Amino acid sequence: MRETLRARREDGAPKHPAGPRKTLPIADRLRAETLASAPVRAAGWSRPGDVVATAGLPIFDRHRGGDVLSTLPSALPRLSAEAAAAPFDDQIANRLLHSRMVVLGTQVDEDSGNRICSQLLLLSEDDPKRDITLLINSPGGSVFAGMAVYDTMRFIPNDVATLVMGFAGSMGQFLLCTGAAGKRYSLPNARVMMHQPSGGLGGTAADIAIQAENLAYTKKTLQEITARHTGRTVEQIAEDQRRDAWFTAEQAREYGFIDHVVESIGDLGGDTARRFGFGAVHPGIAEAGRSEAGEGRK
């Protein structure tokens, strides 16, 4: 028996054939996981089980009794390194970006915020005069990530039009109403929800006092910006957002969150549709869209 084992070792056979499986170094694994999930994130949507890279950041968490300011745990499930990239989603992202459309289709977090800021900067570098469109279907999220997107929208010279599809709540509502004046749109069955930021406080008494002061400052800042973009007073915004305030598309237009409710691409009109990246719209289609919209409102 000993001679057999010695012969195997001399022949170069492994001493422990059924030893532990080799794994990639951590840096390589993280790189592989990032590449595997990047196409989906680039398109603005997440796959089930995709990482939400917001550990340690306050966000609005609508799964804990309403959108409350909370902190995600540091350990969250990731896609495996073996997960295949989704070429179809990658194609969608590239086509939308080629048409100067950026999608916010998830909660506002560190990952989606960084992606949107990067895309806005790249599109502005490509053409500093053409409009960029931000398509929104989001329940809200991180105040910090949302303010980064807002500041980037103000930072670049381009007008950033906004269009809500489905739902714009909390920070999603904030980004919707802060689009370029006259270029804020909603589809007819979309809903908008506004409320004040809130959060759980913890730590020492001194820490709680500091957190409360910061939360009050954040709330006041959001109220002032919202008032400026809606034409309402800060006092009215503060009163209306004491509790969740829900708006239909028409109510959102009347309140000042948006400028137009559109039912079709033709309803946008040729010039506006081109600014949205939809290409040329035939005059007959545009006229038909306006006629149908007018009949629907009678």
Image (spheres, helix red, strand yellow):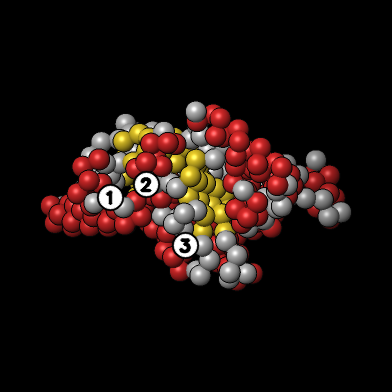
Determine whether label 3 and label 2 are within 8 Å by CB: no
Which residue occupies the foreground of this view, 36 or 192?
192
CA gap, disc 3 to disc 2? 19 Å
- Residue 232, label in figure: 1
Q: Residue at x 34, y 38 (%)?
A: 67
Circle 2 residue: 256
How dense is the environment of label 1, judged by Cα within 10 Å: few (below 14), some, or many (20 and up)?
Answer: some
- Where does the image place residue 91, in percent across and percent down from the top left? 73, 49
Determine whether label 2 and label 1 are within 8 Å by CB: yes
User: For residue 69, what is the image quadrant?
Assistant: top left
Dot 1: element: loop
- Where does the image place residue 79, in percent across and percent down from the top left? 60, 43
Q: Residue at x 31, y 52 (%)?
A: 231
Q: Earlier in the sequence, mark 3 or mark 1?
A: 3
Dot 2: element: loop
Which residue occupies the foreground of this view, 8 or 34?
34
Q: Tell which tag, 3 or 1, sits nearer the viewer.
A: 1
- Where does the image place residue 262, in percent across and percent down from the top left? 54, 40
- Residue 153, label in figure: 3
Dot 3: element: helix
| 101 sits to left or right of 6 | left
Q: Residue at x 28, y 44 (%)?
A: 196
Establish if 249 lies above or below 256. above
Establish if 15 lies above or below 187. below
Q: Earlier in the sequence, mark 2 or mark 1?
A: 1
